[in-house]
Amino acid sequence: MIAELQNVTKAYRAAPGAPEQRVLAGLNLSIAAGETLSISGSSGCGKSTVLNLLGTLDEPDSGSVKLFGQAVPYGDEGALSELRANQLGFIFQLHHLLPQCSALENVLIPTLGGAVRPDQAKALERAHRLLARVGLGAHLDKRPAQLSGGERQRVAVVRALIREPGLLLADEPTGALDAASASSLIDLLLELNAEEGTTLVLVTHDPALAARMARRYRLVDGLLSQS
Ligand SMILES: Nc1ncnc2c1ncn2[C@@H]1O[C@H](COP(=O)(O)OP(=O)(O)O)[C@@H](O)[C@H]1O
Ligand SMILES: [Mg+2]
């Protein structure tokens, strides 16, 4: 399994001393290599919380999170950041591209840090190939402000994939796009899943987009059910 959540609970307090609000209530989820799955549910039901747990950005109150067959090394910031850099790709609703950098530079940023730095010549070759693959071959030198919303999200997708992650986590990646751009971004994510074998977890509240994933889940009352 690429990822396994077992009996995971998570609760938050809105403020110190405020009553605890349970978000995840003993949730189980197993994700196999190469699959595509969606998580839907009403706003505030805990979708991002699940994705953040899969991305090691958050720790459960109880239960276990395993990634790539290993328990997540909470508390070891070095090991966590290596895991995120080498194995996890993130795409969010907002692209979070650096405004002063070109599309090509934005894509290469994840390859510049870390203890195990990827070969720069290979990273550059991959960046060129993937940017061309997503239709941005003629826009390498444009800054985010010079690109459309859909084009910016395509740059964000390439940035997420540049280090060949095993698991791609997309949190409402189409939330700021019009319907046509949203649909073509999902086309692209599915094509890249097939070409690169990257496991894809898509959080979306759009049933038409969710329906395009091989497995679909709904998050209700802190638990997932297949739909
Ligand atoms: N860091 C946090 N501190 C306090 N409450 C939080 C925190 N993160 C999330 N929550 C609360 O947990 C619930 C689930 O949040 P989230 O996972 O972001 O939902 P979704 O992504 O489904 O909209 C919400 O009620 C939210 O306010
Ligand atoms: Mg969310």
Image: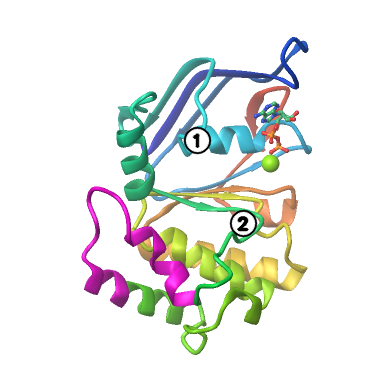
On residue 219, which mark appears?
none
Residue 51 in the image: state x and y as whole percent.
56, 38
Query: Which circle, 1 or 2, is nearer the viewer?
Result: 1
Q: Main secondary structure of the magenta part?
A: helix
The reply to whether the magenta stretch includes residue 114 is yes
Does residue 126 appear anywhere in the picture? yes
Which element type, helix, strand or loop, lies under badge 1? loop
Q: Nearer the viewer, residue 121 or 221?
A: 121
Q: Nearer the viewer, residue 202 or 136?
A: 136
Residue 144 in the image: state x and y as whole percent.
60, 74
In this view, the residue farthest toward the bottom is: 138
Is 115 left, or right, of 30 in this rendering? left
| Amino acid found under the numbered disc labelled 2 | Arg
Residue 34 in the image: state x and y as whole percent.
40, 50
The residue depicted at 41 percent of the width and 61 percent of the height is 161
Is 197 left, or right, of 183 in this rendering? left
The residue depicted at 76 percent of the width and 34 percent of the height is 44
Does residue 211 appear anywhere in the picture? no
Classify residue 109 by image quadrant: bottom left
| Amino acid found under the numbered disc labelled 1 | Leu
Q: Which residue matches tag 1?
A: 57
Tell me the CA gap for discs 1 and 2.
Answer: 27 Å
The reply to whether the magenta stretch includes residue 224 is no
Q: Is residue 116 above or below residue 43?
A: below
On residue 212, which mark appears?
2
Classify residue 72 by image quadrant: top left
Ligand 1 falls in quadrant: top right
Determine contact: label 1, label 2, CB under 8 Å.
Answer: no
> Which portion, as a residue range, is magenta?
103-125
**Quadrant the C terminus occupies:** top right
**Quadrant the N terminus occupies:** top left
